[in-house]
């Protein structure tokens, strides 16, 4: 149960309250959060794998198992591949975050990513039950995972700013606070801790080169992640192909998504 | 009965215990109950299109069950994502009030639907065109959704004044709810009941994807 309490604290932003963070102290124990990433990634993978079960003759359940394993693997393997370069470049530009601190922060972002994805799982499950079209399922999955990816991205960048800035919380505009003072809700406003996705400072200049490195790294992570997804495929399982753990290595992710979009809008 | 309708009146006006910023505790089941009753009323009228025999009473009954089912099932599917998003945006403390705003939008939608039920029935009287009836119902639902959204905005205004991120949560909810709701409506059809087909709870054909059907209609193929 403590696993879920930790997750809840992460989502509420209690783990990343400005001021409690510093370059070498990020309170996200790796063991707990890696297991959370595996469990929640597995939940989304579970919903993802059902399409193949429902649309293949004869019924084969191995795809569900494969997706449950592959989805968390996708995120964690991408991290393993891209993390060393991030760390080296961070050190080069003089960011004081420690190795373990950076790693914890990134695992936290992955947990946020898979949690949002898993929470969209029921919607995916419903559409899996209703849909026979393979291109639609591919596009829907890409869309859901993109949404969760962008939320995680927001989490990562905002948390990074909190680490770099380390100043007392400026909760809202002076004007907003002034207006709020008139309402009976005022006490609630001032006592509220900022959420995990909340911006604590509006000035971009204070963040320095570490921020630029992170942004470039995120691009790298996205590209490697997309291609990793392609290497690890099938996740959904095309109904006309037999089950395989891995497909042969050809093509790439982006070409495939474009092709599925064309299929979806072209011939339906 | 009168007492219950007075509650509905206060809800529509947003006064007393239904005031968006009301501190009064009222039973949580008021809003779900309103959705259940009023959506069922409209469902009954909706299913009365081809009401020619006793056999067809079943369509009335089915639709009366299915319209509330449509609203509640969509809500349940969209809820986990909504809760996680609210938590991440730091709005978890207001979750109760956010849920109240969402239920209020659905209750508003149901009440507006029910209030338009006589108009729908009148439309059915005037025409026996099935496609026309479908389109008319689509229009009624679109209108009621808009009204529900306005009601939700009344509640959300208080929340947004407290924290501007509530606006993001509200829009995220509207988008996901519409996306899932359209498919749910398609899955649970028939609501009106085609005169050419026998009465049934669900269509006796494999489930299909509404968006694929729409795209086929537009792009052919």
Image: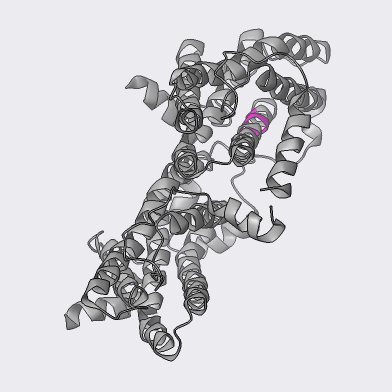
Tell me the colour scheme of the image: one colour
- Whether residue B127 is situated above or below residue A152 in the rendered picture: below
The residue nearer to you, when weighing B76 against B5, is: B76
Q: Residue at x 39, y 74 (%)?
A: B195
Identify which residue, A182 or A103, lies in the foreground. A103
A156 part of magenta stretch: yes
Residue A54 higher or lower than B143, as above or below? above
Residue B106 in which image quadrant: bottom left
Quadrant assignment, res B23 = bottom left
Magenta residues, start to end: A155-159
Q: Main secondary structure of the magenta part?
A: helix
Residue that appears at 53% across and 59% down: B160
Asked if residue A168 shows in the view, the reply is no
On screen, residue A55 versus residue A217, left or right, reads left
Residue B146, position as x, y percentages in the image: 52, 71
Q: Position of residue B97 (x, y in %)?
A: 39, 56
Dividing the picture into quadrants, the one containing residue B59 is bottom left
The total of numbered circles placed on residues is 0
């Amino acid at each position: 149960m403590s696993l879920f309490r930790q997750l809840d604290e992460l989502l509420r932003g209690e783990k990343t309250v400005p001021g409690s963070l510093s370059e070498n102290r990020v309170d996200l124990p790796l063991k707990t959060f890696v297991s959370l990433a595996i469990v929640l990634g597995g939940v989304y993978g579970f919903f993802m794998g059902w399409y193949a079960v429902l649309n293949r003759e004869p019924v084969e359940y191995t795809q569900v198992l494969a997706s449950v394993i592959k989805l968390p693997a996708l995120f964690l393997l991408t991290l393993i591949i891209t993390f060393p370069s991030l760390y080296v470049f961070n050190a080069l530009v003089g960011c004081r975050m420690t190795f373990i601190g950076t790693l914890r922060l990134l695992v936290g972002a992955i947990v946020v990513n898979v949690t949002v994805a898993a929470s969209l799982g029921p919607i995916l499950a419903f559409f899996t039950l209703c849909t026979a079209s393979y291109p639609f399922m591919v596009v829907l999955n890409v869309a859901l995972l993109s949404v969760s990816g962008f939320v995680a991205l927001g989490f990562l960048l905002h948390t990074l700013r909190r680490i770099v800035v380390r100043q007392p919380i400026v909760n809202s505009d002076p004007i907003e606070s002034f207006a709020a003072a008139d309402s009976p809700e005022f006490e609630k406003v001032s006592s509220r801790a900022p959420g995990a996705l909340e911006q604590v400072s509006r000035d971009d200049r204070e963040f320095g080169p570490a921020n630029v490195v992170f942004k470039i790294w995120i691009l790298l992570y996205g590209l490697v992640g997309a291609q990793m997804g392609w290497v690890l495929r099938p996740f959904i399982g095309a109904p006309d192909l037999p089950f395989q753990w891995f497909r042969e290595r050809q093509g790439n992710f982006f070409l495939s998504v474009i092709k599925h979009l064309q299929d979806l809008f072209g011939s339906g | 009965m009168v007492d219950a309708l007075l509650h509905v009146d206060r809800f529509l006006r947003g006064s007393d215990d239904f005031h968006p910023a009301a501190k009064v505790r009222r039973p949580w089941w008021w809003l779900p109950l309103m959705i259940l009753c009023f959506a069922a009323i409209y469902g009954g009228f909706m299913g009365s299109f081809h009401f020619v025999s006793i056999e067809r009473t079943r369509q009335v009954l089915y639709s009366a069950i299915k319209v509330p089912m449509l609203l509640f099932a969509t809500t349940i599917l969209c809820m986990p994502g909504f809760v996680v998003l609210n938590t991440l945006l730091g709005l978890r403390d207001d979750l109760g009030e956010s849920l109240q705003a969402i239920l209020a939008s659905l209750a508003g939608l149901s009440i507006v639907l029910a209030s338009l039920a006589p108009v729908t029935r009148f439309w059915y009287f005037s025409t026996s065109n099935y496609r026309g009836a479908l389109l008319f119902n689509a229009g009624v639902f679109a209108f009621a959704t808009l009204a529900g959204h306005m009601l939700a905005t009344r509640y959300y205004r208080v929340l947004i004044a407290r924290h501007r991120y509530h606006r993001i949560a509200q829009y995220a909810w509207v988008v996901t709810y519409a996306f899932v709701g359209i498919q749910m409506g398609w899955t649970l059809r028939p609501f009106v009941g085609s005169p050419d087909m026998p009465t049934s709870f669900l269509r006796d054909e494999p489930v299909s994807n509404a968006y694929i059907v729409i795209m086929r209609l537009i792009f052919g193929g």
